Image (cartoon, coloured by chain):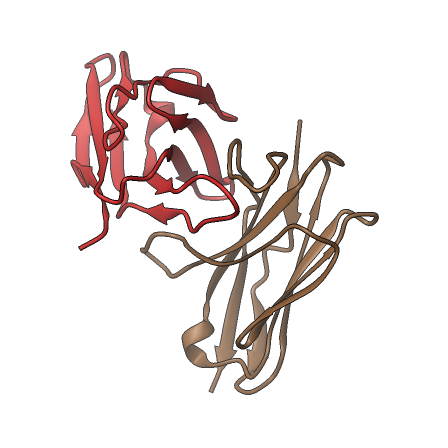
Chain colours: A brown, B red
Amino acid sequence: QKEVEQNSGPLSVPEGAIASLNCTYSDRGSQSFFWYRQYSGKSPELIMFIYSNGDKEDGRFTAQLNKASQYVSLLIRDSQPSDSATYLCAVTNYGGSQGNLIFGKGTKLSVKP
Amino acid sequence: EAQVTQNPRYLITVTGKKLTVTCSQNMNHEYMSWYRQDPGLGLRQIYYSMNVEVTDKGDVPEGYKVSRKEKRNFPLILESPSPNQTSLYFCASSLGTSGNEQFFGPGTRLTVL
């Protein structure tokens, strides 16, 4: 059974701090990695995707991938109260595509003003 | 407006009464998918479709059917619903390749009595 593991949290950080969200996956054949944000009562929305080892930056968000360690993370710099949400890590073994997408259970982030 | 629509948004039904949840997208997306979200279990993929007439099982396909006769529609069919199918259901679509954003519908909250 392919698994994606996340710490459920809640992760609480003060406004302006860096929030670090982590995810591990069991399938070594995984090729594409996604981070989604879900506000309470709302649908998930894609924040970032990453395919290659290393870092990928987009504004305040940085995704980090280490395939050898089967680990992917999301850093949120200058955290804002509006970043308070549940963050879902998702993984697929389809290169570049979404195919059979497996989600972690999510980490709840709370940013305190 | 580019969107994924689902109907109905809320449904209460009884065990064994066949039902269909419709999903439609107006973005000419090739990829469509159905998920269910349950407390403590996260978001789990039921079925996905990479294109018209092409469907594949996700992680929890038992008790569900889908069809993809047209590009824009991807209905989810529960032939004989049971209480363990009480859940929040999301439909999603994307261009299907290169990590293109997966747009989620607003969700359908289903209760099977």
Vertical placement of residue B54 versus B98, above or below: above
Q: Where residue B64 sits: x, y (%)? A: 36, 18
Q: Where residue A76 sits: x, y (%)? A: 58, 73
Q: Where residue B79 sits: x, y (%)? A: 27, 12
Q: Is residue A37 left or right of residue A43?
A: right
Q: How many labels sit on residues?
A: 0
Residue at image point 32% right, 55% down: A42
**Image quadrant assignment for residue B47:** top left
Vertical placement of residue A99 versus A52, above or below: above
Q: Is residue B108 left or right of residue A36?
A: left
Q: Is residue A44 left or right of residue B18?
A: right
Residue farthest to the right, as pictured: A68
Residue at image point 50% right, 72% down: A110
User: Between B109 and B24, which is closer to the camera in this rendering?
Assistant: B24
User: Between A79 and A65, which is closer to the camera in this rendering?
Assistant: A65
Q: Where residue B108 sits: x, y (%)? A: 25, 39
Quadrant (top left/top right/bottom left/bottom right) for the N terminus of chain A: top right
Residue at image point 35% right, 41% down: B92
**Image quadrant assignment for residue A78:** bottom right
User: Between A26 and B27, which is closer to the camera in this rendering?
Assistant: B27
